[in-house]
Amino acid sequence: MNMTNKWPTTTISDISENLDSKRVPVAKLKRKSGDIPYYGATGIVDYVNDYIFDEELLLIGEDGADWSGGANTAFIINGKSWVNNHAHVLRIKNANIQFVMNYLNYSDLRNYISGTTRGKLNQASLNKIKILNPSLKIQAKVADILSTIDETIEKTDQIIQKTEKLKQGLMSELLTKGIGHKKFKKTKLGEIPEEWEIKMLSLVAKVVDSLHQTPKYSGDGLPMVRVIDIKQGDLDLSSCIKVEKKVYDLFTKNHVPAQGDIVISRVGSFGVFSYVATTKQFCLGQNTAIISPLINGKYLYYALQSPIPTEQVAKQVVGSNQKTLSLKHIKNLYVPKPSSDEQQKIADILCKLDIKIESEIKQKNTLISLKKGLMQDIFSQKVTIN
């Protein structure tokens, strides 16, 4: 890098007009519903029927935000909007607003934050934030480069959302009407194809509780799945804590988890299911259970996410603060049971959509990594922008 061409710097106060005094917080109960976005520290929090601003502005979280590098604290709004007192409002002058936003999101701003319990970026500190200030021509070029990637990320995100919506619609259709059926019957769970059965989960799967004790964790060893590790989709063991082999043996004495099993959370984020696609060894931590299917495992995984079992789960959880789903309730869940052949067909259709979603998510993550790398190269001036 030619240090003689190093970009100059400026401060936020020199390139912006602060409009914080125009902000008006409105309590949720007093907001009148509409189609105008109501912004907080990290984005849209509601929609209202009136507006304060009607222009392109830069918002940056004042409190309740993440100011670390790459956290996307700053974001641009345009058109009619309402902003509460948790986001600073800046009208950018003599600078490219896209360049400023990207530089702020690239930067680690935590040194400007005051407070320990709930951090705050006060206006005085905001005004002192230093920002690179190359020519407007260079700023525009940088903004164009990064905006092109942002647009591709947004398009990929739209594909993901569209595919997820399609999957939810198909799941509801396939798990209540099946494939090619013309005759239906009424059951306690609603209308289903005449040939289908309604079965309690305990009749189509083995349901095994985890041990109700806190194990000793280890730096090395075998993964232990806890409630925090259970998310919709294939079970991911990469972030699991580890336990020694003797602890693993104790926690798998009633059932050794295997590929095709389904893991469920019972407490807190109750009724969340992960499918065990891996062949790696792991054991279950507290407040979880494992469902070992006696029918098509992938079909059962999707069936458990359909509205019918989901509504049952919501009715059966107990506790006011820490919601808990008992093992008995899990075993007593009812699921629709088509023929083995139709189970496979339904699973195949939904699997293809999951594969599509997973592929697009990987593409999105690749683009995000690409943008981070480009920002690092551009803002550290490892590459020359003329």
Image (cartoon, grey):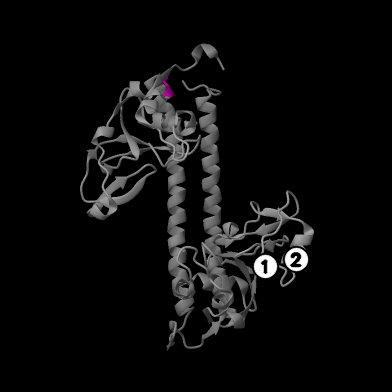
Range drawn in magenta:
130-134
Tell me the quarter of the image containing the N terminus. top right
Q: Is residue 221 or residue 169 the one in the foreground?
A: 221
| Residue at the right extreme of this rendering | 246
Label 1 residue SS: loop
Residue at 59% from the left image edge and 70% from the top image edge: 298
Q: Residues within 10 Å of mark 2 (few under 14, many from 20)?
A: few
43 displayed left or right of 23: right
Left or right: residue 369 versus residue 247 is left
> Which numbered disc, 1 or 2, marks the residue that appears first in the sequence?
1
Q: Residues within 10 Å of mark 1 (few under 14, many from 20)?
A: some
> Which residue lies under the disc numbered 2?
250
CB atoms at circles 1 and 2 under 8 Å apart?
Answer: yes
Eyeballing the image, is 111 above or below 184? above
Which residue is identified by label 1? 211
Residue 57, quarter of the rendered image = top left
- Is residue 107 among the parts visible in the rendering? no
Q: Residue at x 55, y 73 (%)?
A: 326
Q: Residue at x 51, y 26 (%)?
A: 378
